Image: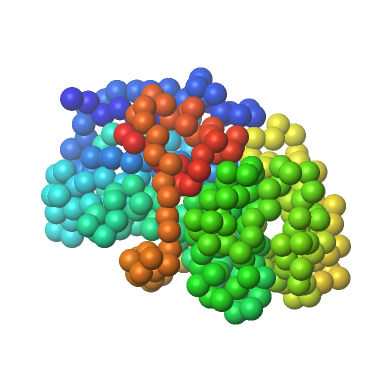
């Protein structure tokens, strides 16, 4: 037995390709005092990963060349020298893309695999769910009766954002790519409407779906969609900026928003958000999301892909081509 690790081989240019990473094998690591070893079962694949491998200023240091790729993952404690974690505990944390991880418990969350399957704890009940919870409620601050629009609405974060907005009594409109994703967002997740940005009539379709204008726009995409939404924002609207996935694989600096004037005229507030900003409140998010899930108010779907670590690059790229439905997870 050995530990297989996906390591960054070089800085990607444009879309990630297999040669940007390499698979290495090493000994299964042994925990030192106050540490424990996790056997990883599921790795979370998130849009932010593309930014993590760029050598640019960001909210976290870039993954170093030769370093195991950063990733949230869920697994089972296999061996422990830490009194707070015992063998058999199900846990979630920033364990990386590998078979085994060593941790001292920092930012590791024990999860209840009887409440929800393990892969859900890197999805809607994990970091993407926490991002949706704090991003919408703390930054977006929706009020009952307001209109909330969510881009990438069928994705891991967007799908949870829209459902929380519905729980809070809002009129919720999703933006997604393709009829199948829009059907899922509207019929299964319970959004009031969903606009297909691939339909060629984004501005008109959005106006029809949100006739009273937009009070909160939860931004996951950027680009043309942001420009379109800006022109339909209401006075004192809020725009939580969670992601800008349309530009993550750009090889040149993307063109800035053309309609930024709306921020002035409509007195909008745009604020970026990183889930780490609420690290001390994660138990609150877990508790509330878990309660809504148990009550049937929060539906969560994982898109679990097979192939193990060998498939990491190909599966990750599904995020940037729209090839996933729901939270993308790699089964290790």
* 239 displayed left or right of 123: right
Which image quarter holds the N terminus? top left
* 104 displayed left or right of 45: left
Closest to the observer, 173 or 69: 173
Q: Is 136 placed above or below 86 here?
A: below
Residue at horizontal 66 percent and vertical 75 percent from the top: 146
Which image quarter holds the C terminus? top left
The x and y percentages for residue 10 are: 53, 25
Residue 240 showing in the rendered view: no
Name the quadrant containing residue 56. top right
Q: Is 297 placed above or below 306 here?
A: below
Closest to the observer, 161 or 275: 161
Q: Is 257 placed above or below 254 here?
A: below
Residue at horizontal 46 percent and vertical 47 percent from the top: 327
The x and y percentages for residue 179 are: 63, 44
Closest to the observer, 167 or 327: 167
């Amino acid at each position: 037995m050995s530990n297989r690790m996906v390591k960054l081989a070089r800085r990607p240019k444009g879309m990630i390709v297999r040669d940007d990473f390499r698979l290495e094998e090493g000994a299964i690591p042994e925990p030192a005092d106050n540490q424990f070893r996790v056997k990883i079962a599921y790795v979370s694949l998130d849009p932010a990963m593309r930014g993590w491998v760029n050598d640019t200023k960001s909210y976290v240091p870039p993954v170093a060349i030769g370093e195991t790729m950063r990733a949230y993952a869920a697994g089972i404690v296999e061996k422990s020298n830490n009194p707070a974690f015992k063998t058999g505990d199900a846990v979630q944390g920033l364990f990386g893309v590998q078979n085994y991880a060593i941790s001292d418990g920092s930012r590791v969350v024990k999860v209840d695999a009887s409440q929800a399957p393990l892969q859900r704890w890197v999805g809607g009940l994990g970091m993407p769910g926490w991002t949706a919870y704090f991003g919408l409620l703390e930054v977006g601050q929706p009020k009952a009766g307001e209109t909330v629009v969510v881009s990438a609405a069928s994705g891991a974060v967007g799908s949870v954002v829209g459902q929380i907005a519905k729980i809070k009594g809002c009129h919720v409109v999703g933006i997604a790519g393709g009829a199948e994703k829009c059907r899922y967002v509207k019929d299964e997740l319970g959004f009031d409407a969903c606009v297909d940005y691939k339909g060629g009539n984004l501005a008109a379709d959005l106006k029809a779906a949100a006739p009273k204008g937009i009070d909160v726009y939860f931004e996951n995409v950027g680009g043309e969609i942001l420009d379109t939404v800006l022109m339909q924002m209401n006075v004192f609207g809020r725009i939580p900026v969670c992601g800008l996935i349309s530009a993550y694989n750009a090889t040149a600096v993307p063109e800035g928003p053309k309609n930024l004037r709306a921020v002035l005229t409509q007195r909008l507030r745009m604020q970026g958000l990183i889930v780490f900003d609420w690290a001390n409140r994660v138990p609150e998010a877990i508790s509330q999301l878990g309660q809504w899930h148990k009550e049937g108010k929060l539906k969560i779907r994982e898109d679990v892909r097979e192939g193990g670590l060998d498939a990491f690059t190909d599966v990750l790229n599904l995020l940037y081509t729209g090839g996933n439905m729901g939270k993308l997870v790699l089964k290790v």
